[in-house]
Structures are given as C-alpha cells and as structure tokens.
Image (cartoon, grey):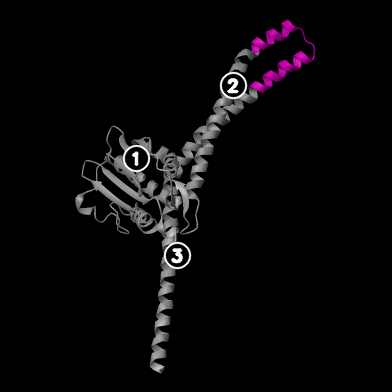
Amino acid sequence: MKECAAEIDSVVRENESLKGMVHHLKETQGQLLRSEKLASIGRLSAGIAHEINNPVGFVSSNSTTLLGYVDRIKEILKMYRTGIKKDLIDKREKQLKIDFILEDIDQLLMENIEGLARITTIVNNLKKFSRDQQSGELISADINEGIRSVLILVKNESKYYADIITDFGDIGQIPCTISELNQVFLNIIMNAVQAIKEQGRGEKGLITVKTWRDDAWVYIAIADDGPGIPQEIQDKIFNPFFTTKPAGTGTGLGLSICYEIVVDKHGGDIQVASRTGAGTTFTIKLPRIREDLNG
C-alpha cells in the first residue's frame, strides 16, 4: 500500500510539473506572438508616420491659409458695420481678393476633411491591428475587412515596390481571433514586398490577394511575382527560427507564428507553392464553422 501511495504521489507531482511546463510554454508562446506583433509595428512605424504626416502637413498649411482668409473677411464685415461707403468697400474687397477667397474656402475645407478622414482611417486600422484579444477568444469577424486594414498599414512600405490587387469574394464572417489572423496577413504580405524589393528591378512587382469560400472553408491566397522560394528550403520555412535573411535582420519567427495561428489555433491549413524566379503563393484555409463552439 505504501508503495502504491508513493507511486500515486509521484504521478501527481509529475502531472503538476507537466501542467506547470504547459502553462509556461503557453506564456512563452504568447510573449513571442506579442514580440512579433511589436516588431511588425516597428517595421511599419516609419511608413505609418509618413502616411500620417502627409495629411497633417496639408491640413496645417490649409488651416494657416484659412486663418488669413478669416482675417480678411472680418475686415470687410467691420467696414460694413461701421457704415463705410459701398464703393470703398467694393474697392477693398478687390484688393483683398474676397471673391477668390470665398471660392477657395470650400476647397480648403474639403481637403482638410479628407486629410483628417485619412488620418482617422490609419489610426483606426492601427488600433485594430494592435488590439490584444484574450487568448483563445473567438469572435465572428470579416476576413476581408481584416485584410483591408492590413493593406492600409503596409501602403507606404509597399507602394514603391509593388502594386497590390485584391479580389475579395463574398465570404461572410467566420469565428476567429481576427487580430492574430491580421498578423498572419501582415507577415506574408510584408515578406512578399521585401522579396520584390531585394530583387532591385526597375519596375514594380505585383501582389494579389484573393478570397473565396466553399461550404466548409474560407480561402485566402496571397501571391507575388517575386524571386520565389528555392525548392530545397520550402519544407523548412514554417520551422521556428528558420530564416533566409542576413543575421540580425530576421527572427525566423514570422512564418512559424503564421503556421501556429492558422493551423494550431484556428484549425485551418497553410500551404506554399513556389518556383524560383516565378513567384510565390501562400494559400490559407480557415473553417467557416468551429465544431468546438457547438458543443
């Protein structure tokens, strides 16, 4: 009996130890994902700053011009209120170019509204991407909307090197952790942009993003016309810490995390098809219905 009790006690301790290890691994996993997300935002920060600074610049300039216009209009209003002769007011209006000002004000205000809308869109999409959801939490989300938000964030980084064409199907919403899937889309698209950039070719490359569905799955295909992935390393690209980038420029976690998010966390699949010199296509499929939510 004592031996049996000791053996049970040993098993219990071992089980507790395994639980501790699993908990620690989950914490480490979460930290890696957050680190990769922060690294992605860091890589995009200069481009995002440029995209925001551009409208901020012309909104500021337009606002300064509008202040000058308001001062001129105030001067004319004051002349009307003080009973100055109409012919003198008309002469002063011509000197101050009031007719032109009244036309230009509308244009300046519309430009400001558009600029502020651009800033709002960028900030909102950055918030969507950065937002942490509780680990394992699934919500009903639109994959197309997630991809659109990612494309806005990568716009300044991609526009010099590749045109991005989208072909969004009517895929509806699926249960997912959208912030994590956005990380997947960002990593794959940024890898495509980087690969095209490193070719140093004269013309811009092409990246296409297509979504569609069947009865059971939603599909996302991200294709580029870049240099492709050599056949001999294609079976390694999803391995943790594997990278083809020079030392110090890549962690080797990007595609590994993509695989984990798609396959392990969402019950989906991710495949790569590539030929050297002929580009690369990543195809992701995600379940439209999660059986684990129905029980």
Image position of 85 (left or right of 204): right
Measuring from the top left, give residue 154's x and y in whole percent. Answer: 41, 41
Residue 128 versus residue 82 in the image, above or below? below
Q: Residues within 10 Å of mark 1 (few under 14, many from 20)?
A: some
Q: Secondary structure at mark 3?
A: helix
- Location of mark 3 (residue): 27
Judge the density around disc 2: few (<14), some (14-19), many (≥20) Cα neighbours within 10 Å: few
Check residue 106 in the rendering and tell me which mark sits there, or answer none.
2
Marks 3/1: CA–CA distance: 34 Å
Q: Label 3 vs label 2: CA separation?
A: 55 Å
x 36%, y 42%: residue? 211
Which residue is denoted by mark 1 in the rendering?
210
Image: 208 above or below 36: above
What secondary structure characterizes most of the magenta part?
A: helix
The percent position of residue 9, horizontal first and vertical second, equals: 42, 86
Residue 99 counted in the magenta span: no
